[in-house]
Structures are given as structure tokens and as C-alpha cells.
């Protein structure tokens, strides 16, 4: 609940993207660690909106986690679209993405 409150504050106060992305990333990791799929979905959706302000390593982590989420929730068409986006960005061969695809 505390992470949710922090995320709401970030949105309401229009916190700059670099800091907001850190808040969303920590929240997403926590949600995954504790099996909160719905909370992860909220975080990754918010992360996708501020992804432009993230480092390449964070972008790759977010994309990898999104692929896992789409696979686990059986969203096949969105999974294919995400893979196409990664191909366009030349990230399909990144170690993190290869691990997720295995």
C-alpha cells in the first residue's frame, strides 16, 4: 500500500520522469518479488510512459519483465507486438531478452 501511495503522489505532483521511473521500477520489482501481478501491471504501464527517460539497462529490464508478464497472462497478440518492437529496436539479442525468451 505504501508503494501505491508513493506512485499516486508521483502522478499527482507530476514528478519529473527520471525520478518517477525509479519509483515505478522499484514498485514493479517489489510487485514481482511478492507475486502481485496486478500491481506489476500498473507499474509497468506507468514505466512504459516514462521509458524515454530511463537508462538502456532499465529499458531492457522493463521490456524483459513486460514479455514475461504478457506470456504469463496469455496475451499472445500483445506479446507478438512487443517482440516486434524489440526487433525494431535491435534488442532481441540482448542477454536479458534472450533469457526471457528461453
Image (tube, rainbow, N blue to C red):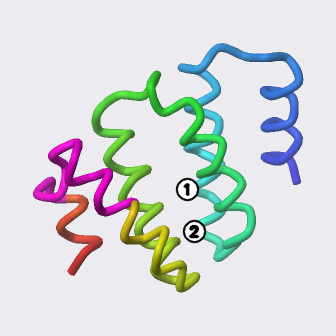
Q: Residue at x 66, y 42 (%)?
A: 46
Contact check, label 1 and label 2, Cβ < 8 Å: yes
Q: CA distance from mark 1 to mark 2?
A: 6 Å
Q: Position of residue 45 (x, y in %)?
A: 63, 49
Q: Which residue is mark 2?
A: 33
- Residue 65 in the figure: left or right of residue 5: left
Q: Nearer the viewer, residue 16 or 84?
A: 84
Q: How far across and down, in percent of the image, does residue 21 sit?
A: 57, 31
Q: Which mark is residue 29?
A: 1
* Mark 2 surroundings within 10 Å by alpha-carbon count, few (fewer than 14), some (14 through 19), many (20 or more): few
Q: Position of residue 47 (x, y in %)?
A: 57, 41
Q: Where the N terminus falls, by quadrant? A: bottom right
The span picked out in magenta is 82-95
Q: Is residue 83 magenta?
A: yes
The answer to whether 83 is drawn above or below residue 36 in the figure is above
The front one of 85 and 48 is: 85
Q: Is residue 40 above or below residue 21?
A: below
Amino acid at each position: 500500500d505504501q508503494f501505491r501511495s508513493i506512485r499516486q503522489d508521483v502522478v499527482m505532483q507530476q514528478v519529473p520522469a527520471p525520478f518517477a521511473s525509479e519509483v515505478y521500477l522499484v514498485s514493479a520489482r517489489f510487485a514481482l518479488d511478492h507475486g502481485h501481478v496486478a500491481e506489476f501491471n500498473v507499474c509497468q504501464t506507468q514505466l512504459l510512459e516514462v521509458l524515454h527517460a530511463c537508462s538502456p539497462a532499465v529499458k531492457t529490464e522493463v521490456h524483459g519483465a513486460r514479455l514475461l508478464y504478457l506470456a504469463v497472462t496469455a496475451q499472445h497478440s500483445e506479446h507478438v507486438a512487443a517482440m516486434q518492437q524489440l526487433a525494431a529496436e535491435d534488442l532481441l539479442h540482448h542477454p536479458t531478452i534472450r533469457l526471457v525468451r528461453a
